[in-house]
């Protein structure tokens, strides 16, 4: 993809307002000011709608792409840090975004807004990301550097698979259905 030597941040989602794609790009712009080698990989299903978010960003600093679901993990594996932002509201308080598990299962630490289901607890307990407040999108350069310096993709992937893979829950699911069906 021509991104060697870049620090790749990834957004994987749609362009619906509640997934905050415009806020994600605004956060990337702040990150880019602190880390000039930052690059945004923006995976979405609606390229024409997403283009409006990139008018003020140099074309060499992002890749906007639409992919079949089967190809998403390969692109996530090319990234360094996932971005997942949602507003603080009741729906997101009980949410469990699939993208969070996908990021972790690909070994990516996550920059995430607080108040999304149990993601905050997972990030804090395992030290595998940074929480930010949507009000100011405040993230310090030192936090980013520390996050980048401490990436252990194998460890994050293991945590992600323990928490979110079907394999981790298969025996419990089979046992549950055995009880229900007998």
Image: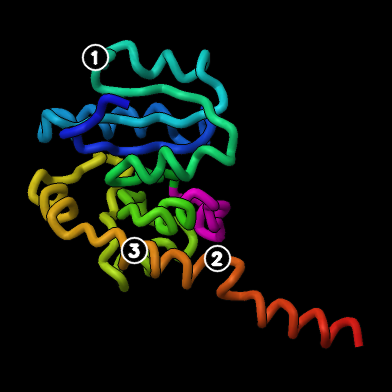
Residue 130 drawn at (x, y percent): 26, 55
Crowd tier of the residue under label 3, counting other residues whose Cα lies within 10 Å: few below 14, some 14–19, many 20 or above: many
Determine whether 49 is above or below 99 in the image.
above
Question: Is residue 57 found inside the magenta-colored segment of the image?
Answer: no
Cα gap from disc 3 to disc 2, whole angstroms: 13 Å
How many numbered discs?
Answer: 3
| Residue sitting at the far right | 182
Helix, strand or loop at mark 3: helix
Q: Residue at x 8, y 50 (%)?
A: 142
State the residue position of label 3: 156
- How packed is label 1: few (under 14 Cα within 10 Å), some, or many (20 or more)? few
Name the mark on residue 58: 1
- Residue 108: x %, y % from top left: 33, 53
Cβ–Cβ under 8 Å for marks 1 and 2:
no
| Front position in the image: 113 or 172 | 172
Dividing the picture into quadrants, the one containing residue 114 is: bottom left
Taking 102 as reference, is 178 above or below it?
A: below
Mark 2 lies on a secondary structure that is loop
Distance of label 1 from label 3 (alpha carbons): 31 Å
Left or right of 137? Residue 71 is: right
**Tag 2 residue:** 165
**Reading the chain from its start, which is encountered first: label 3 or label 2?**
3
Q: In which quarter of the image is the C terminus?
A: bottom right
Q: Nearer the viewer, residue 22 or 110?
A: 110
Q: In which quarter of the image is residue 131?
A: bottom left
- Asked if 55 appears above or below 24 in the picture, the reply is above
**Quadrant into which the N terminus falls:** top left
Would you place residue 74 above or below residue 113 in this image?
above
Residue 40 point in image, percent of width and height: 30, 30
| Disc assigned to residue 123 | none
Residue range in magenta is 88-99
């Amino acid at each position: 993809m021509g991104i060697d030597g870049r620090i790749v941040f990834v957004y994987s989602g749609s362009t619906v307002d509640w997934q905050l794609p415009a806020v994600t790009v605004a956060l990337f712009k702040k990150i880019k000011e602190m880390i000039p080698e930052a690059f945004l990989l923006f995976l979405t299903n609606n390229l024409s709608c997403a283009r409006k978010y990139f008018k003020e960003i140099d074309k060499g600093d992002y890749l906007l792409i639409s992919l079949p679901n089967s190809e998403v993990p390969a692109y996530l594996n090319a990234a360094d840090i996932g971005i997942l932002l949602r507003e603080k509201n009741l729906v997101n308080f009980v949410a469990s975004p699939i993208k969070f598990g996908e990021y972790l299962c690909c070994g990516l630490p996550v920059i995430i807004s607080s108040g999304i289901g149990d993601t905050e607890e997972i990030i804090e307990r395992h030290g595998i990301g940074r929480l930010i407040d949507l009000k100011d999108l405040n993230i310090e350069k030192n936090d980013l550097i520390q996050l980048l310096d401490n990436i252990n993709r194998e460890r994050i992937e293991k945590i992600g698979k323990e928490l979110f893979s079907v394999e981790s829950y298969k025996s419990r699911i089979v046992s549950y259905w055995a009880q229900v069906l007998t």
